[in-house]
């Protein structure tokens, strides 16, 4: 059984078997404390509308789950979120005083750079084989351990994380693990 307080949910509406906002509620009820709303293909206006819906769904659950917008700074500003997750290329060009930034890294060098740029946390991956990165060799647990040792900010393992392997990522030093498919299909049926 997964200990959901160690999981950061990452959204992908294309993986849902059921209604997206109902799935967000299931995630919130699971015990997850953080959701990164990562819907990449949306325009800014579409994303803002969807993010507002995610916030409302989470508020309805009264679980206190934190929602982190991805990519769009306007979402963080408009909805006054504590965090914003940016790709590394955007992190290099941003300096926010009132918001904590997170980013994704794929090497120890990037992890160190992200820390120097002021990242409050990083997602490091992909650790295990995943359909999201089909055909790309996973970086593995040694990579994850090296990233965790290189920085003194929270590191969240991402990529192919599931019930059978998440503990191994935590044992290598990850503060939490990110799950996408498992979260977007939690309690659902095909």
Image: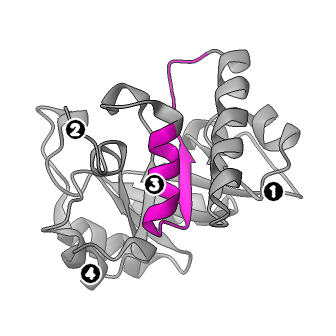
Left or right for 54, reference 23 = right
| Label 2 vs 3, first from the N-terminus | 3
Left or right for 96, reference 58 = right
Residue 164, relative to residue 181: is it above or below? below
Q: Label 3, on which residue? A: 27
SS for tag 2?
Answer: loop
Q: CA distance from mark 3 to mark 1?
A: 24 Å
Residue 41 x, y percent position in the rendering = 50, 18
Q: CA distance from mark 2 to mark 4?
A: 33 Å
Residue depicted at x 85% and y 49%: 80
Q: In this picture, which residue range is highlighted in magenta?
A: 22-42
Does the CB distance between marks 2 and 4 fall below 8 Å?
A: no
Residue depicted at x 67% and y 58%: 117
Task: Judge the density around disc 4: few (<14), some (14-19), many (≥20) Cα neighbours within 10 Å.
Answer: some
Q: Label 1, on which residue? A: 99
Q: Label 4, on which residue? A: 172
SS for tag 1?
Answer: loop
| Label 3 vs 1, first from the N-terminus | 3
Residue 110 x, y percent position in the rendering = 46, 55
| Label 4 vs 3, first from the N-terminus | 3
Q: Label 2, on which residue? A: 189
């Amino acid at each position: 059984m997964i200990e959901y307080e160690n999981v950061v949910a990452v959204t992908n509406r294309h993986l849902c078997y059921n209604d997206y906002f109902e799935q967000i509620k299931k995630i919130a009820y699971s015990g997850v404390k953080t959701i990164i709303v990562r819907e990449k293909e949306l325009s800014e206006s579409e994303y803002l509308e969807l993010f507002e819906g995610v916030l409302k769904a989470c508020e309805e659950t009264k679980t206190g789950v934190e929602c982190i917008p991805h990519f769009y700074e306007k979402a963080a500003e408009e909805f006054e979120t504590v965090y914003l997750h940016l790709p590394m290329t955007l992190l290099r060009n941003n300096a926010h005083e009132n918001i904590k930034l997170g980013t994704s890294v794929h090497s120890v060098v990037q992890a160190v750079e992200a820390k120097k740029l002021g990242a409050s946390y990083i997602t490091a991956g992909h650790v295990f084989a995943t359909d999201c990165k089909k055909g790309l060799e996973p970086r593995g647990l040694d990579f994850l351990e090296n990233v965790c040792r290189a920085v003194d900010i929270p590191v969240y393992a991402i990529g192919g994380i599931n019930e059978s392997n998440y503990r191994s990522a935590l044992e290598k030093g990850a503060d939490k693990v990110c799950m996408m498919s498992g979260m977007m299909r939690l309690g659902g049926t095909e």
